[in-house]
Image (spheres, rainbow, N blue to C red):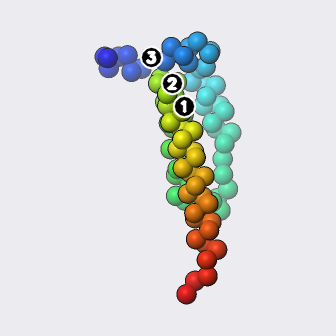
C-alpha cells in the first residue's frame, strides 16, 4: 500500500455512494449535553472521528460502532459510581 492510496475512499464507500460531506453532516447532528461527563464527551468525539475515517477504510465504521458500545458501558459505569453513597 502506498501513502497516496490512504487518501482514496474505500471502494465500498464509493459503491454505497457515501461522501465525506454526507458523513460529516450526519455526525455533526450528534451532540450531548454539557452535563455529560467530560470523559464521555471525549469518547463520543473520538467515535465520530473513527466513523469519519470509515470513508477511507470501511471497516472503521465497524470499529466506530464497537467503540460506541464501550462508550455506553462507560456511561453506565460513570452513572452507577456517581450514585454510590460517598463515605
**Image position, residue 51 (x, y; %):** 54, 34
Mark 1 and mark 3: Cα distance apart in space: 16 Å
| In the depicted structure, whether residue 87 falls above or below residue 21 | below
**Image position, residue 12 (x, y; %):** 54, 16
Query: How busy is the neighbourhood of tag 1: few (under 14 within 10 Å), some, or many (20 plus)?
Result: some
34 horizontally vs 13: left or right: right
The residue identified by callout 1 is 61
Mark 3 and mark 2: Cα distance apart in space: 11 Å
Q: Quadrant of residue 80?
A: bottom right
Q: Earlier in the sequence, mark 1 or mark 3?
A: 3
Residue 52 visible somewhere in the drawing: no
Q: How many marks?
A: 3
| In the depicted structure, whether residue 39 falls above or below residue 61 | below
The residue identified by callout 2 is 58
**Image position, residue 67 (x, y; %):** 52, 44
Q: Identify which residue is drawn at 59% across, 20% down.
A: 19
Res. 8 mark: 3
Mark 1 and mark 2: Cα distance apart in space: 6 Å
Residues at marks 3 and 2 touching, judged by CB atoms closer than 8 Å: no
Residues at marks 1 and 2 touching, judged by CB atoms closer than 8 Å: yes
Q: Earlier in the sequence, mark 3 or mark 2?
A: 3
Q: Quadrant of residue 26?
A: top right
Q: Nearer the viewer, mark 1 or mark 3?
A: 1
Amino acid at each position: 500500500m502506498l501513502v497516496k492510496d490512504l487518501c482514496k475512499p474505500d471502494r465500498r464507500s464509493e459503491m454505497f455512494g457515501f461522501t465525506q460531506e454526507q458523513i460529516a453532516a450526519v455526525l455533526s447532528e450528534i451532540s450531548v449535553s454539557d452535563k455529560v461527563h467530560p470523559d464521555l464527551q471525549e469518547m463520543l468525539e473520538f467515535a465520530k472521528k473513527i466513523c469519519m475515517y470509515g470513508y477511507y477504510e470501511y471497516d472503521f465504521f465497524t470499529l466506530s460502532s464497537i467503540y460506541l458500545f464501550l462508550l455506553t458501558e462507560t456511561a453506565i459505569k460513570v452513572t452507577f459510581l456517581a450514585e454510590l453513597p460517598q463515605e
